[in-house]
Image (cartoon, grey):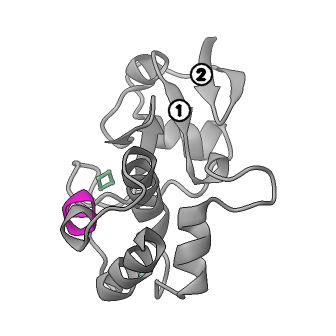
Amino acid sequence: MTKLQLNGKTIAVETTETTPLAYVLRNECGIKSVKLGCEAEQCGACMVLADDRPVPSCTLTFEEAANYRLTTLEGLGKGEVLSQVQHALLASNASQCGYCLSGIAIAAHALFQSNAHPTRNDIVTALDGHLCRCGAHPRVIRALEQLAT
Ligand code: FES
Ligand code: FES
């Protein structure tokens, strides 16, 4: 049994040390916002915060993850109240199927935590590793630019 610090709580999870965190979150912790795409750090769908830094959970092992304070989309807001980034993305309907969106929200949250008024270039750079098969990137960037003003 290993402890994980997840979304402000400490939970005990039993799994093998080398299991990728994304599988642990989805299959053992009921965290379905974390999506699996490439499983090779190439798409951003599985992004979580590890001590406030966005990291792909498809390659981070369970053993490594236990060293960090982890936050997923479910932990960005406070209870029923969405975070500013979540609210901005939803208010602008900045997605199509939504598969990429929780990873994008994680990366954007980290950006706005470090800089409340990022430039368009800052936003594009922060989201560079996130693929969107629906082509919703322009809407995402517009939504985040509005939040930054
Ligand atoms: S599934 Fe992790 S980066 Fe694509
Ligand atoms: S909205 Fe469908 S993958 Fe981005």
- Where does residue 103 sit, x and y in percent of width and height? 42, 59
Circles 2, 1 touching at the beta carbon (< 8 Å): yes
Q: Name which residue type carries label 2.
A: Leu
Q: Would you say the magenta stretch is mainly helix, strand or loop?
A: helix
Q: Is 92 situated above or below 121? A: below
Q: Name which residue type carries label 1.
A: Leu
Question: Going 37% across and 27% down the picture, which residue do you hit?
Answer: 61
Residue annotated with mark 1:
70
| Magenta-highlighted residues | 123-128
Relative horizontal placement of residue 135, taking residue 81 as reference (left or right): left
Question: Going 23% across and 62% down the picture, which residue do you hit?
Answer: 122
Q: Is 99 situated above or below 78? A: below
Q: Does the magenta stretch include residue 126?
A: yes
Numbered label attached to residue 16: none
Q: In which quarter of the image is the C terminus?
A: bottom left
Q: Quadrant of the N terminus?
A: top right
- Where does residue 40 sit, x and y in percent of width and height? 22, 48
- Give whichever of 88, 147 is nearer the camera: 147
- Where does residue 140 sit, x and y in percent of width and height? 39, 79
Secondary element at tag 2: strand
Label 1 CB less than 8 angstroms from ligand 1: no
Residue annotated with mark 2:
4
Relative horizontal placement of residue 130, taking residue 84 as reference (left or right): left
Secondary element at tag 1: strand
